[in-house]
Amino acid sequence: MNRGRIIAGVLAALFAVPVLSQANPNQPPPHTAPFPDLGSGEGRAERRKSFELSPELQRGFSAGHIREQQRRLDAAFAALRAQTPERPDAYVLTIALDSDPVFAREAREAARVLSARYGAAGRTLTLAGPDGTSDDAPHGSITALLLALDHLGDVMDASEDVLVLYTTSHGSDIGLAYHYGDSGYGILSPAKLKSALEEAGIQRRVLILSACYSGVFVPMLASPDSAILTAAASTRTSFGCVAENDWTFFGDALINRALRQPVGLEDAARTASRSVAEWEAEARYLASLPQVSIGADAARWLPALEAGKPQIASAPVGRPAFDKAALTAAAAKKAAERQAASAPK
C-alpha cells in the first residue's frame, strides 16, 4: 500500500462523523464511512503481520456510552453462576462483532440454543449490539471479548469445565472483523484469540466461528482439547450475512436447525455442512466449505457434555437464511433489468 493511500485512509478515519443516534434506540448504527487502515509497518509483509496483534479503534463514543457498556459488562459478569465442583459445566459465550443486525439476532438466538443444549442456564454470556428490536446486552467488541474470556477463566475450573464460544461477523483471511457503525473497528486474529484463551487458562473449548474465511483459525486453535467448527474454509467466503436477515447460512444450518436435533456435535456439523452446500448450489454460489476439527481429548469429553442435548427436535425460528422464492424473484428482476437495458432505444 503506498503512502498516498495510507494518508487517505487516515484522513477518512479522522473526518468521518460517527452515526450514534437513531430514531429507534434499538436500531443499530449503519456503516457509512470507509473501514480505516489499521495496519502498521513499512512493507506488505510487515503490515500484514501487524494484524496478529488485533488492532482495535474506537472513536466518537460518548463518556456515557462507554460507562454504560462497562456497567452492562460488569453486571453480566456478576450474574454468572459459579461452577459446580466435580462436575463439568459448560459456559456459553456468544458475540456479534459487527453492528449489522443479522449478527446480533444470530448471537442472541445462538445463546438460547447453546445454553439449552449444554445446560448452561446462568452460565451464558451474550455480547451483541442493538438488532432493531432490543439493545439489552453488552455490545460486542474485541476488548469486550478479551475481558469476557479473562473473566470466564477466573470462574471456570480448567480441569473439567468447557467454554462454548460462538462468534458471528464478517471476516477476512487475517481474522474476524469488528465493525460497529462508524465508531468501532478492528481485526481479531487467530493468534490473538489463541493467546487470550491460553492466558485465561481455558483448555477445554468448543469454538464455533461464523464468518468468511473463518477456516484460517483452525491451524492456530486446533488442540487435543478443542472442537472447532467454522463457516468457511480459509480461502472461501460464507453467505447470508445481509443486514436484514435473521440468520447467516451457517448460523441457520448449524444453530437454528442441526443443533436443535437430538444428535451429537459432529453429526450436527455434518448435517449443517450438507444444508449449506445445498443452498449454495441452488444459489450458484462458490461453496464455502465449512470446516470441522475435533481433538482426540475433546472427542472423549464431548459425549458427557452433550448428555443433555435435545431428546426431541425443536422448530427453527426466524426467517430462513436461504429463501429460494426470493432468490428466484431477485434473479428474474435482474434478468428483466438486463433485458430492458439492452433493448433498442
Image (cartoon, helix red, strand yellow):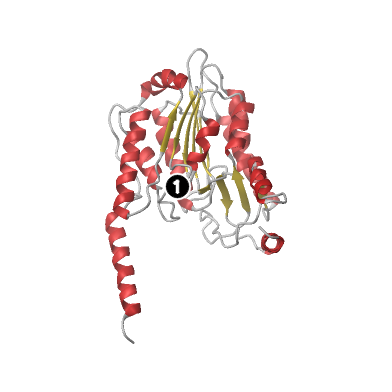
Examine the rendering and report whether any part of residue 125 can be seen.
no
- Whole-percent x and y of residue 89? 48, 21
Instruction: Point out the image quarter for the C terminus.
Output: bottom left
Quadrant in the rendering for residue 341 = bottom left
Disc 1 target residue: 236
Toward the bottom, the furthest residue is 345
- Whole-percent x and y of residue 126? 51, 38
Foreground: 181 or 211? 211
Judge left or right: residue 343 versus residue 299: left
Instruction: Point out the image quarter for the N terminus.
Output: bottom right
For the residue labelled by badge 1, is the local secondary structure a helix, a strand or a loop? Answer: loop
Quadrant in the rendering for residue 271 = top left
- Whole-percent x and y of residue 286? 38, 51
Q: What residue lies at 67% left-to-right and 53% top-to-bottom?
A: 61
Relative to 247, does residue 343 appear above or below in the rendering?
Answer: below
Q: Amino acid at mark 1?
A: Arg
Give the class, few, some or many, for how many residues have Cα within 10 Å of label 1's Cα (few <14, many ≥20): many
Foreground: 10 or 236? 236
Quadrant in the rendering for residue 272 = top left
Toward the top, the furthest residue is 86
- Whole-percent x and y of residue 128? 52, 44
Foreground: 269 or 309? 269
Judge left or right: residue 172 versus residue 63: left
Judge left or right: residue 181 versus residue 306: right
Q: What residue lies at 40% left-to-right and 46% top-to-bottom?
A: 288
Q: What residue lies at 35% left-to-right and 41% top-to-bottom?
A: 253
Foreground: 73 or 49? 49
- Across the whole image, how many numbered discs are drawn on residues? 1
Q: What residue lies at 37% left-to-right and 38% top-to-bottom?
A: 254
